[in-house]
């Protein structure tokens, strides 16, 4: 069973301490607990089963945890998963294609800034009174609530 910590949180000091008391370093203990959802018994088995691959397995687990934490931080910063967010978005830009097919012509971008639309066509930028929103290939939205 898991003591301290929890399946959703990181390993607790008590859990790490149990594995350290068995002779494992705290970095390996932490990785084992992460890999096994903070289950001390499963983490112990994982540590013993790694053999010569222990160091690389620990690094892999900790590296993946860093990536996961970074992605979660980015989502939080963007408001993704925010229980208070209403899920309302506003269109702030889109990319469309000018030409008869994708082999000819080129792409332009329409961006909304300070309440007005502008078209970005290579080096030319101009106001766009009625941007063709229905012709977009790629749409960019901003969370508004």
Image (cartoon, helix red, strand yellow):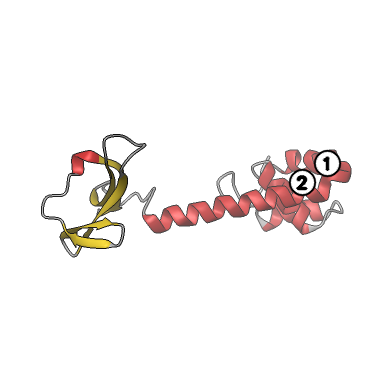
**Residue that protrudes farthest toward the bottom in the picture:** 114
Query: Whole-percent x and y of residue 35?
Result: 68, 43
Mark 1 and mark 2 residues within 8 Å of each other at the beta carbon: yes
Vertical placement of 12 versus 132: above or below?
below
Q: Crowding at label 1, few (<14), some or many (≥20) Cα neighbours within 10 Å?
A: few
Front residue (pair 123, 81): 123
Query: Is 20 situated left or right of 141 in this image?
Result: right
**Upstream in sequence: badge 1 or badge 2:** 1
**Which numbered tag is attached to residue 57?**
2
Front residue (pair 121, 67): 121
Q: Crowding at label 2, few (<14), some or many (≥20) Cα neighbours within 10 Å?
A: some
Query: Whole-percent x and y of residue 84?
Result: 30, 52
- The answer to whether residue 31 shows anywhere in this view is yes
- Residue 46 figure quarter: top right
**Residue that protrudes farthest toward the top in the picture:** 101
> What residue is disc 1 on?
50
Q: Secondary structure at mark 2?
A: helix
């Amino acid at each position: 069973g898991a003591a301290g910590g929890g399946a959703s949180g990181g390993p607790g000091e008590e859990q790490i301490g149990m594995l350290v008391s068995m002779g494992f370093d705290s970095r390996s203990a932490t990785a084992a607990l992460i890999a096994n959802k903070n289950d001390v018994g499963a983490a112990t088995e994982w540590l013993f089963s790694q053999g010569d691959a222990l160091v690389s397995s620990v690094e892999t687990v900790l590296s993946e945890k860093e990536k996961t934490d970074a992605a979660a931080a980015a989502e939080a910063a963007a408001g993704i998963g925010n229980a208070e967010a209403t899920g309302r978005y506003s269109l702030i830009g889109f990319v469309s294609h000018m030409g008869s097919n994708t082999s000819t012509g080129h792409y332009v971008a329409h961006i909304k800034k300070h309440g007005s639309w502008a078209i970005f066509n290579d080096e030319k930028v101009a106001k766009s009174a009625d941007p063709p929103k229905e012709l977009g290939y790629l749409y960019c939205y901003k969370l508004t609530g």
